[in-house]
Image (cartoon, rainbow, N blue to C red):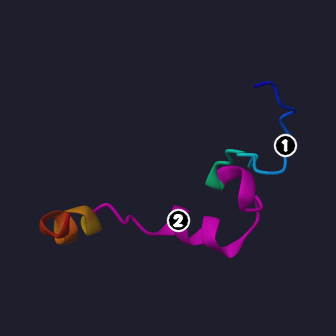
């Protein structure tokens, strides 16, 4: 049986990085540059 297909059930996916979403002069970027958060990985390693 032939039928027309419609696009109503489709979803569009777009991929963005956090660098694209956070403005260059946002406070979060200043905090990231001032504090070394690498210690957190050791603290949460057993939670994964």
**Marks 1 and 2, the one that precedes in the sequence:** 1
Q: Is residue 36 magenta?
A: yes
Identify the residue at image location x=76%, y=46%: 12
| Residue farthest toward the left in the current orientation of the protein | 46
Residue 22 image point, x, y percent: 71, 62
Marks 1/2 in contact by CB < 8 Å: the verdict is no
* Bounds of the magenta segment: 19-38
Name the one closer to the observer, 14 or 37: 14
Quadrant occupied by the C terminus? bottom left
Vertical placement of residue 32 versus 13, above or below: below
Q: Nearer the viewer, mark 1 or mark 2?
A: 1
Identify the residue at image location x=37%, y=66%: 37
Identify the residue at image location x=84%, y=50%: 8
The residue wearing badge 1 is 7
Q: Give SS at disc 1.
A: loop
Q: Residues within 10 Å of mark 1 (few under 14, many from 20)?
A: few
Name the one closer to the observer, 2 or 21: 2
Identify the residue at image location x=44%, y=69%: 35
Alpha carbon distance from label 1 to label 2: 42 Å
State left or right for residue 6 relative to residue 12: right
State left or right for residue 4 relative to residue 34: right
Q: Is residue 45 magenta?
A: no
């Amino acid at each position: 049986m032939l039928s027309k297909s419609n696009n109503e059930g489709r979803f569009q996916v777009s991929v963005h990085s956090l660098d694209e979403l956070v403005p260059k002069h946002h406070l979060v970027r200043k905090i990231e540059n001032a504090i070394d958060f690498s210690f957190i990985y050791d603290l949460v390693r057993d939670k994964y």
